[in-house]
Amino acid sequence: MGFSNFFAFVKKESLHIIRDTRTMLIVMCIPILLMVLFGFAISTEVNNVNVAVVAPNRTDGVEEAVDKMARNNYFSFIGYIDNSEIDKYLRSGKVGAVVVFDKDFDRYLAHSLNGIPVKPIIQIIVDASNVNTAGSATLYLQNVLLDKASQQMLFETRLLFNPQMKSAYNFVPGIMGLVFILVCAMMTSVSIVREKEVGTMEVLLVSPVRPFKIIFAKMIPYFLISCIVLILILLLARYLLDVPMSGGVGGIFLLSLLYLVLSLSLGLLISTIAETQVAALLISAMVMMMPILMLSGMLFPIENLPTFFQVVSNIVPARWYIDAIRKMMIQGLSLLDVWKNCLILAGMTLMLIVVSLKKFNDKLE
Protein backbone atom coordinates (compact mmCIF):
# COMPACT_ATOMS: atom_id res chain seq x y z
CA MET A 1 0.00 0.00 0.00
CA GLY A 2 2.85 2.35 0.86
CA PHE A 3 4.45 1.86 -2.55
CA SER A 4 1.10 2.35 -4.31
CA ASN A 5 0.53 5.64 -2.49
CA PHE A 6 4.04 6.78 -3.28
CA PHE A 7 3.61 5.93 -6.97
CA ALA A 8 0.29 7.77 -6.98
CA PHE A 9 2.01 10.90 -5.67
CA VAL A 10 4.73 10.62 -8.32
CA LYS A 11 2.06 10.26 -11.03
CA LYS A 12 0.13 13.24 -9.66
CA GLU A 13 3.22 15.46 -9.61
CA SER A 14 4.24 14.35 -13.09
CA LEU A 15 0.81 15.16 -14.53
CA HIS A 16 0.81 18.49 -12.72
CA ILE A 17 4.18 19.44 -14.27
CA ILE A 18 3.20 18.25 -17.75
CA ARG A 19 -0.02 20.29 -17.65
CA ASP A 20 1.90 23.39 -16.59
CA THR A 21 2.81 24.71 -20.04
CA ARG A 22 4.97 27.55 -18.76
CA THR A 23 7.09 25.25 -16.61
CA MET A 24 7.56 22.78 -19.44
CA LEU A 25 8.61 25.56 -21.80
CA ILE A 26 11.16 26.83 -19.29
CA VAL A 27 12.51 23.38 -18.46
CA MET A 28 12.76 22.14 -22.05
CA CYS A 29 13.45 25.27 -24.08
CA ILE A 30 15.90 27.24 -21.94
CA PRO A 31 18.62 24.52 -22.08
CA ILE A 32 18.35 24.32 -25.86
CA LEU A 33 18.40 28.12 -26.23
CA LEU A 34 21.45 28.41 -23.97
CA MET A 35 23.28 25.70 -25.88
CA VAL A 36 22.61 27.33 -29.25
CA LEU A 37 23.35 30.82 -27.90
CA PHE A 38 26.69 29.93 -26.34
CA GLY A 39 27.56 27.47 -29.08
CA PHE A 40 27.01 29.81 -32.02
CA ALA A 41 26.07 33.39 -31.13
CA ILE A 42 28.48 33.94 -28.23
CA SER A 43 31.87 32.87 -29.45
CA THR A 44 35.43 33.57 -28.36
CA GLU A 45 36.85 32.13 -31.57
CA VAL A 46 38.83 34.30 -33.94
CA ASN A 47 36.89 34.93 -37.14
CA ASN A 48 37.56 37.23 -40.09
CA VAL A 49 40.43 39.15 -38.54
CA ASN A 50 41.76 41.62 -41.09
CA VAL A 51 45.47 41.03 -41.64
CA ALA A 52 47.97 43.13 -43.60
CA VAL A 53 51.45 42.00 -44.62
CA VAL A 54 54.72 43.88 -44.72
CA ALA A 55 57.22 42.19 -47.03
CA PRO A 56 60.28 44.11 -48.30
CA ASN A 57 60.84 41.31 -50.81
CA ARG A 58 57.75 39.52 -52.12
CA THR A 59 59.54 36.27 -52.84
CA ASP A 60 58.04 32.87 -53.58
CA GLY A 61 58.36 31.86 -49.93
CA VAL A 62 56.56 34.97 -48.76
CA GLU A 63 53.83 34.58 -51.39
CA GLU A 64 53.29 30.96 -50.38
CA ALA A 65 53.01 31.85 -46.69
CA VAL A 66 50.63 34.75 -47.41
CA ASP A 67 48.49 32.58 -49.67
CA LYS A 68 48.18 29.97 -46.95
CA MET A 69 47.07 32.64 -44.49
CA ALA A 70 44.62 34.20 -46.98
CA ARG A 71 42.95 30.84 -47.62
CA ASN A 72 42.29 30.36 -43.90
CA ASN A 73 38.74 31.09 -42.77
CA TYR A 74 39.89 32.88 -39.64
CA PHE A 75 41.63 35.72 -41.47
CA SER A 76 40.90 38.22 -44.23
CA PHE A 77 44.00 39.29 -46.13
CA ILE A 78 43.62 42.95 -47.13
CA GLY A 79 46.94 43.34 -48.93
CA TYR A 80 50.51 44.48 -48.58
CA ILE A 81 51.42 47.70 -46.79
CA ASP A 82 54.60 49.62 -46.08
CA ASN A 83 56.38 49.43 -42.76
CA SER A 84 55.53 53.07 -42.07
CA GLU A 85 51.80 52.36 -42.38
CA ILE A 86 51.58 49.74 -39.63
CA ASP A 87 50.65 52.13 -36.84
CA LYS A 88 48.09 53.97 -38.99
CA TYR A 89 46.33 50.77 -40.06
CA LEU A 90 46.17 49.37 -36.53
CA ARG A 91 44.96 52.62 -34.95
CA SER A 92 42.26 53.11 -37.58
CA GLY A 93 40.92 49.60 -37.06
CA LYS A 94 41.44 48.65 -40.70
CA VAL A 95 43.39 45.63 -39.57
CA GLY A 96 43.61 43.61 -36.37
CA ALA A 97 47.07 42.25 -37.08
CA VAL A 98 50.09 42.84 -39.27
CA VAL A 99 52.58 40.14 -40.30
CA VAL A 100 56.09 41.42 -41.06
CA PHE A 101 58.45 39.17 -43.05
CA ASP A 102 62.21 39.61 -42.89
CA LYS A 103 63.74 40.87 -46.13
CA ASP A 104 65.93 37.73 -46.32
CA PHE A 105 63.08 35.35 -45.49
CA ASP A 106 63.64 33.02 -48.49
CA ARG A 107 67.40 32.83 -47.95
CA TYR A 108 66.91 31.94 -44.29
CA LEU A 109 64.24 29.43 -45.26
CA ALA A 110 66.54 27.75 -47.79
CA HIS A 111 69.33 27.50 -45.25
CA SER A 112 67.05 25.95 -42.67
CA LEU A 113 65.93 23.33 -45.19
CA ASN A 114 69.58 22.43 -45.84
CA GLY A 115 70.14 21.75 -42.18
CA ILE A 116 71.80 25.05 -41.32
CA PRO A 117 70.26 26.33 -38.04
CA VAL A 118 69.27 29.76 -39.34
CA LYS A 119 65.79 30.86 -38.38
CA PRO A 120 63.64 33.04 -40.63
CA ILE A 121 62.08 35.95 -38.80
CA ILE A 122 58.34 36.61 -38.86
CA GLN A 123 57.07 39.44 -36.69
CA ILE A 124 53.38 39.46 -35.70
CA ILE A 125 52.01 42.82 -34.58
CA VAL A 126 48.52 42.62 -33.09
CA ASP A 127 46.04 45.19 -31.79
CA ALA A 128 45.92 44.22 -28.08
CA SER A 129 43.12 46.60 -27.05
CA ASN A 130 41.05 43.42 -26.83
CA VAL A 131 43.32 41.05 -24.92
CA ASN A 132 41.39 37.86 -25.66
CA THR A 133 41.19 38.51 -29.38
CA ALA A 134 44.85 39.53 -29.52
CA GLY A 135 46.01 36.36 -27.80
CA SER A 136 43.85 34.11 -29.95
CA ALA A 137 44.81 35.88 -33.19
CA THR A 138 48.51 35.55 -32.37
CA LEU A 139 48.23 31.82 -31.70
CA TYR A 140 46.12 31.31 -34.83
CA LEU A 141 48.61 33.17 -37.03
CA GLN A 142 51.53 31.23 -35.60
CA ASN A 143 49.73 27.96 -36.22
CA VAL A 144 48.76 28.92 -39.77
CA LEU A 145 52.20 30.18 -40.80
CA LEU A 146 54.05 27.23 -39.32
CA ASP A 147 54.32 24.40 -41.86
CA LYS A 148 56.72 21.65 -42.81
CA ALA A 149 58.84 24.04 -44.84
CA SER A 150 59.47 26.35 -41.92
CA GLN A 151 59.99 24.22 -38.86
CA GLN A 152 63.02 26.35 -37.96
CA MET A 153 61.04 29.54 -37.38
CA LEU A 154 61.35 31.46 -34.17
CA PHE A 155 58.02 30.15 -32.97
CA GLU A 156 56.58 26.67 -32.78
CA THR A 157 53.05 26.16 -31.51
CA ARG A 158 51.14 22.97 -30.78
CA LEU A 159 47.50 23.14 -29.76
CA LEU A 160 46.31 19.96 -28.05
CA PHE A 161 42.73 18.69 -27.60
CA ASN A 162 41.16 21.74 -29.29
CA PRO A 163 43.48 22.71 -32.17
CA GLN A 164 40.85 24.92 -33.80
CA MET A 165 40.23 26.69 -30.47
CA LYS A 166 36.46 26.31 -30.74
CA SER A 167 34.67 28.15 -27.95
CA ALA A 168 31.91 25.53 -27.89
CA TYR A 169 34.41 23.10 -26.38
CA ASN A 170 34.72 25.46 -23.44
CA PHE A 171 31.10 26.60 -23.12
CA VAL A 172 29.20 23.30 -23.44
CA PRO A 173 30.44 21.77 -20.13
CA GLY A 174 29.79 25.10 -18.42
CA ILE A 175 26.26 25.32 -19.81
CA MET A 176 25.59 21.78 -18.62
CA GLY A 177 26.68 22.76 -15.10
CA LEU A 178 24.42 25.82 -15.17
CA VAL A 179 21.36 24.29 -16.84
CA PHE A 180 21.00 21.36 -14.46
CA ILE A 181 21.11 23.72 -11.49
CA LEU A 182 18.37 25.81 -13.10
CA VAL A 183 16.17 22.87 -14.01
CA CYS A 184 16.64 20.75 -10.89
CA ALA A 185 17.35 23.08 -8.00
CA MET A 186 15.32 26.12 -8.97
CA MET A 187 12.25 24.29 -10.21
CA THR A 188 12.25 21.81 -7.32
CA SER A 189 12.57 24.50 -4.67
CA VAL A 190 9.82 26.61 -6.24
CA SER A 191 7.54 23.59 -6.55
CA ILE A 192 7.85 22.64 -2.86
CA VAL A 193 7.59 26.24 -1.65
CA ARG A 194 4.47 26.72 -3.77
CA GLU A 195 2.79 23.88 -1.89
CA LYS A 196 3.62 25.58 1.41
CA GLU A 197 2.59 29.01 0.17
CA VAL A 198 -0.89 27.97 -1.02
CA GLY A 199 -1.46 25.73 2.01
CA THR A 200 -1.63 22.37 0.23
CA MET A 201 1.51 21.03 1.90
CA GLU A 202 -0.38 20.54 5.16
CA VAL A 203 -2.98 18.50 3.30
CA LEU A 204 -0.29 16.31 1.79
CA LEU A 205 1.42 15.79 5.14
CA VAL A 206 -1.72 14.29 6.74
CA SER A 207 -1.91 11.66 3.98
CA PRO A 208 -0.84 8.04 4.64
CA VAL A 209 2.47 8.66 2.86
CA ARG A 210 5.36 9.67 5.10
CA PRO A 211 6.66 13.27 4.64
CA PHE A 212 10.04 12.36 3.19
CA LYS A 213 8.32 10.18 0.58
CA ILE A 214 6.17 13.14 -0.43
CA ILE A 215 9.30 15.21 -0.97
CA PHE A 216 10.96 12.50 -3.06
CA ALA A 217 7.73 12.07 -5.02
CA LYS A 218 7.91 15.74 -5.96
CA MET A 219 11.58 15.46 -6.90
CA ILE A 220 11.36 12.37 -9.09
CA PRO A 221 9.44 14.03 -12.01
CA TYR A 222 12.04 16.78 -12.18
CA PHE A 223 14.79 14.18 -12.13
CA LEU A 224 13.19 12.36 -15.07
CA ILE A 225 12.72 15.61 -16.99
CA SER A 226 16.33 16.50 -16.28
CA CYS A 227 17.43 13.16 -17.72
CA ILE A 228 15.56 14.01 -20.93
CA VAL A 229 17.23 17.44 -20.97
CA LEU A 230 20.60 15.75 -20.41
CA ILE A 231 20.06 13.49 -23.43
CA LEU A 232 19.02 16.47 -25.57
CA ILE A 233 22.08 18.48 -24.50
CA LEU A 234 24.45 15.61 -25.27
CA LEU A 235 22.86 15.14 -28.70
CA LEU A 236 23.10 18.87 -29.44
CA ALA A 237 26.68 19.02 -28.23
CA ARG A 238 27.77 16.07 -30.33
CA TYR A 239 25.85 16.50 -33.57
CA LEU A 240 25.11 20.24 -33.73
CA LEU A 241 28.15 21.80 -32.04
CA ASP A 242 30.51 18.93 -32.94
CA VAL A 243 31.88 18.66 -29.39
CA PRO A 244 33.71 15.33 -28.93
CA MET A 245 32.78 12.77 -26.30
CA SER A 246 36.28 11.35 -26.09
CA GLY A 247 35.93 9.96 -22.57
CA GLY A 248 32.84 7.89 -23.38
CA VAL A 249 29.17 8.82 -23.33
CA GLY A 250 28.41 6.31 -20.57
CA GLY A 251 30.80 7.90 -18.09
CA ILE A 252 29.62 11.41 -18.95
CA PHE A 253 26.01 10.31 -18.44
CA LEU A 254 26.71 8.67 -15.08
CA LEU A 255 28.60 11.69 -13.77
CA SER A 256 25.76 13.93 -14.93
CA LEU A 257 23.20 11.77 -13.10
CA LEU A 258 25.17 12.29 -9.88
CA TYR A 259 25.14 16.04 -10.51
CA LEU A 260 21.38 15.93 -11.13
CA VAL A 261 20.80 14.32 -7.75
CA LEU A 262 23.05 16.93 -6.14
CA SER A 263 21.06 19.73 -7.81
CA LEU A 264 17.77 18.25 -6.63
CA SER A 265 19.13 18.06 -3.09
CA LEU A 266 20.20 21.69 -3.30
CA GLY A 267 16.70 22.62 -4.42
CA LEU A 268 15.26 20.76 -1.43
CA LEU A 269 17.58 22.68 0.91
CA ILE A 270 16.48 26.00 -0.58
CA SER A 271 12.84 25.02 -0.11
CA THR A 272 13.43 24.59 3.63
CA ILE A 273 14.85 28.14 3.83
CA ALA A 274 12.48 30.08 1.57
CA GLU A 275 8.92 30.83 2.59
CA THR A 276 7.66 32.19 -0.74
CA GLN A 277 8.22 31.33 -4.40
CA VAL A 278 9.80 34.72 -5.02
CA ALA A 279 12.24 34.14 -2.18
CA ALA A 280 13.09 30.71 -3.58
CA LEU A 281 13.80 32.23 -7.00
CA LEU A 282 15.94 34.99 -5.53
CA ILE A 283 17.95 32.56 -3.40
CA SER A 284 18.41 30.27 -6.40
CA ALA A 285 19.53 33.13 -8.64
CA MET A 286 21.84 34.82 -6.14
CA VAL A 287 23.23 31.81 -4.30
CA MET A 288 23.62 29.50 -7.29
CA MET A 289 23.79 31.34 -10.61
CA MET A 290 26.36 33.99 -9.71
CA PRO A 291 28.85 31.56 -8.11
CA ILE A 292 28.43 29.20 -11.07
CA LEU A 293 29.09 31.96 -13.58
CA MET A 294 32.00 33.48 -11.70
CA LEU A 295 33.61 30.73 -9.59
CA SER A 296 33.08 27.48 -11.48
CA GLY A 297 35.54 27.98 -14.32
CA MET A 298 32.68 28.35 -16.79
CA LEU A 299 33.70 31.86 -17.91
CA PHE A 300 37.00 32.49 -16.14
CA PRO A 301 39.84 30.07 -15.35
CA ILE A 302 39.99 29.23 -11.64
CA GLU A 303 43.75 29.83 -11.70
CA ASN A 304 43.20 33.46 -12.72
CA LEU A 305 41.03 34.23 -9.69
CA PRO A 306 42.42 35.87 -6.52
CA THR A 307 43.50 33.34 -3.89
CA PHE A 308 40.47 34.03 -1.68
CA PHE A 309 38.01 33.26 -4.48
CA GLN A 310 39.99 30.19 -5.51
CA VAL A 311 39.43 28.83 -2.01
CA VAL A 312 35.73 29.78 -2.05
CA SER A 313 35.26 28.09 -5.43
CA ASN A 314 35.95 24.73 -3.79
CA ILE A 315 32.44 24.75 -2.27
CA VAL A 316 30.76 25.41 -5.64
CA PRO A 317 29.57 22.00 -6.93
CA ALA A 318 29.57 23.18 -10.55
CA ARG A 319 33.32 23.73 -10.39
CA TRP A 320 34.01 20.02 -9.90
CA TYR A 321 31.36 18.91 -12.38
CA ILE A 322 32.43 21.28 -15.17
CA ASP A 323 36.10 20.41 -14.66
CA ALA A 324 35.37 16.69 -14.86
CA ILE A 325 33.09 16.99 -17.90
CA ARG A 326 35.70 19.02 -19.79
CA LYS A 327 38.35 16.43 -19.08
CA MET A 328 36.07 13.60 -20.19
CA MET A 329 34.70 15.34 -23.30
CA ILE A 330 37.77 17.14 -24.60
CA GLN A 331 40.82 15.41 -23.12
CA GLY A 332 39.42 11.91 -23.39
CA LEU A 333 39.77 10.94 -19.71
CA SER A 334 37.56 8.18 -18.34
CA LEU A 335 35.24 8.30 -15.35
CA LEU A 336 37.91 6.59 -13.25
CA ASP A 337 40.42 9.31 -14.16
CA VAL A 338 38.18 11.97 -12.58
CA TRP A 339 37.52 9.95 -9.43
CA LYS A 340 38.46 12.90 -7.20
CA ASN A 341 35.75 15.08 -8.74
CA CYS A 342 33.23 12.24 -8.44
CA LEU A 343 34.10 11.68 -4.78
CA ILE A 344 33.73 15.39 -3.97
CA LEU A 345 30.37 15.59 -5.77
CA ALA A 346 29.13 12.43 -4.04
CA GLY A 347 30.16 13.85 -0.64
CA MET A 348 28.38 17.13 -1.37
CA THR A 349 25.26 15.25 -2.48
CA LEU A 350 25.15 13.14 0.68
CA MET A 351 25.67 16.20 2.89
CA LEU A 352 22.91 18.18 1.12
CA ILE A 353 20.42 15.29 1.41
CA VAL A 354 21.10 14.80 5.13
CA VAL A 355 20.95 18.52 5.96
CA SER A 356 17.86 19.11 3.80
CA LEU A 357 15.84 16.24 5.29
CA LYS A 358 16.87 17.23 8.81
CA LYS A 359 15.79 20.85 8.31
CA PHE A 360 12.54 19.69 6.68
CA ASN A 361 11.74 17.39 9.59
CA ASP A 362 12.60 20.16 12.07
CA LYS A 363 10.08 22.43 10.38
CA LEU A 364 7.40 19.76 10.60
CA GLU A 365 8.00 19.40 14.32
Image (cartoon, rainbow, N blue to C red):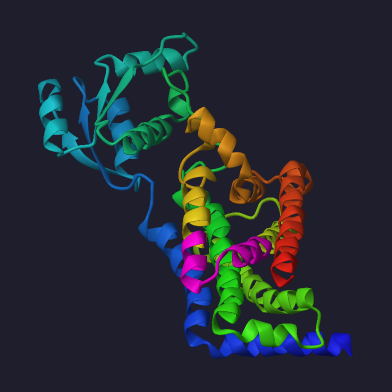
Quadrant into which the N terminus falls: bottom right
Res 241 visible:
no
Total labels: the figure holds 0
In x, y percent, where is residue 71?
A: 33, 45
Tell me where residue 86 sits by quadrant: top left
Tell me where residue 11 sits by quadrant: bottom right
Please state which of residues 11 and 198 is positioned toward the viewer in this rendering: 198
- Which residue does the image show at 74% across and 74% down from the upper left? 216
Vertical comparison of 320 with 188: above or below = above
In x, y percent, where is residue 343?
A: 77, 46
Vertical comparison of 83 with 9: above or below = above
Tell me where residue 340 sits by quadrant: top right
Q: Majority secondary structure of the magenta segment?
A: helix
- Tell me the magenta residue range: 263-283
Res 291 visible:
yes
Judged from this view, the residue extending furthest toward the right is: 1
Please state which of residues 361 and 115 is positioned toward the viewer in this rendering: 361
Please state which of residues 343 and 125 is positioned toward the viewer in this rendering: 343
Please state which of residues 360 and 162 is positioned toward the viewer in this rendering: 360
User: For residue 277: magenta?
Assistant: yes
- Which residue does the image show at 66% across and 47% down from the upper left? 324
In x, y percent, where is residue 335?
A: 76, 50
Vertical comparison of 136 with 30: above or below = above
Name the side, left or right, on which 174 lies relative to 125.
right
In x, y percent, where is residue 281?
A: 48, 66
Vertical comparison of 316 with 139: above or below = below
Judged from this view, the residue extending furthest toward the front is: 365
- Which residue does the image show at 52% across and 35% down from the upper left? 309
Quadrant into which the C terminus falls: bottom right
